[in-house]
Amino acid sequence: MGRAAASGHEVVSKLRLDIVSSVFEPEMRLKFADLTKRYDVGIGTLREALSSLLSEGFVTLDAGKGFRVAPVSADELSEIVDLYLDLETRALAEAITNGDDDWETDIVAAYHRLSLIESLPWEQRMERHDEWVERHREFHESLVAACDSRWLIRLRSIMFNQLDRYRFITKMSTEGRGRKKFEEHRLIKEAVLARDTDKATRLMEDHIRDTATRAIEKM
C-alpha cells in the first residue's frame, strides 16, 4: 500500500515536470500506452496521477477522447501572475522576518546549485533544462521557507506550479536574456539575506512580471 502511494506520487511529480519542461506541450494528447511505458507504471496508478494533475489544472479531460495537456493563454497567465505575486510577496516578507541562520544557509546553498547551471554556456545550460527547472524551484522555495503560515505556503506552491507551466515559452530565449535572469536571482538573494523586505519584494515582482511579459509576447 505504501509502495503504491509512493509510486503514484512519483508519477505525478515526473509527469508534472515533463509538462513544465514542455516534453508534453499544451493541448497534446496524453496516451495511456505511451505513458505507462515511459513511467513504468500500471494504468490504475497512471489514471490516479492524471486525475491529480487534472485537479491542479495541468491536464484536461475530453469526454470520449481522454486526457490532454491543458491549453495556455495570455489571459490565464496574467491572472496567475497577479495571484502568485500576492502570495509570494506576503510569504517572502514573513520569511525575512522569521528566518534564522539555517534559513540563510539553505538559501545560499540553493542559489549555488542554481548558479552552477545558470553560469554555463547557453547550449550546455539548455541541455540541463530539466535540472534547471528543479533547482529553480528549490531556490524560490528556499526564499520563503521561513514563512510560518502553512496555508500561505501551500497556496503559493499551487500558483508557482501554474506559473511554471508558462516558462517553457521563454526557455529558448536568447543567451543575453538568460544572463539577465541569472543576475536577477543574485540580486533577489542578496536583498533577502540583507533583510531588506521592500527591495526583495520589489525585485521579486519585477522578476516574475518580466518573465510573464516575455511569455505573453511570444504567445
Image (cartoon, rainbow, N blue to C red):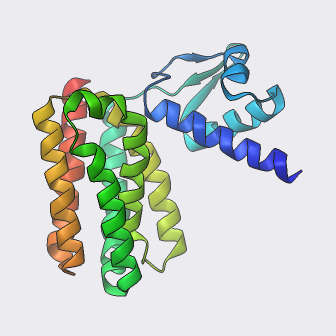
Q: Is residue 48 left or right of residue 139?
A: right
Residue 150 in picture, x, y percent from top left: 54, 73
Residue 115 in picture, x, y percent from top left: 26, 52
Residue 79 in picture, x, y percent from top left: 34, 45
Residue 183 in picture, x, y percent from top left: 14, 53
Vertical comparison of 92 with 207: above or below: below
Q: Please give the name of the residue rendered at 23% of the width and 76% of the height, measured from the top-left corner.
A: 193
Q: Residue furthest right?
A: 1
- How many numbered circles are shown? 0
Quadrant in the rendering for residue 112: bottom left
Q: Is residue 13 left or right of residue 103?
A: right
Quadrant in the rendering for residue 62: top right
Q: Residue furthest left?
A: 176
Q: Please give the name of the residue rendered at 83% of the width and 48% of the height, measured from the top-left corner.
A: 3
Q: Please give the name of the residue rendered at 24% of the width and 44% of the height, measured from the top-left corner.
A: 118
Q: Is residue 139 left or right of residue 199?
A: right
Q: Is residue 5 visible?
A: yes
Vertical comparison of 145 with 49: above or below: below
Q: Please give the name of the residue rendered at 33% of the width and 77% of the height, measured from the top-left corner.
A: 104
Quadrant of the rendering where the C terminus is positioned:
top left
Q: Is residue 171 visible?
A: no
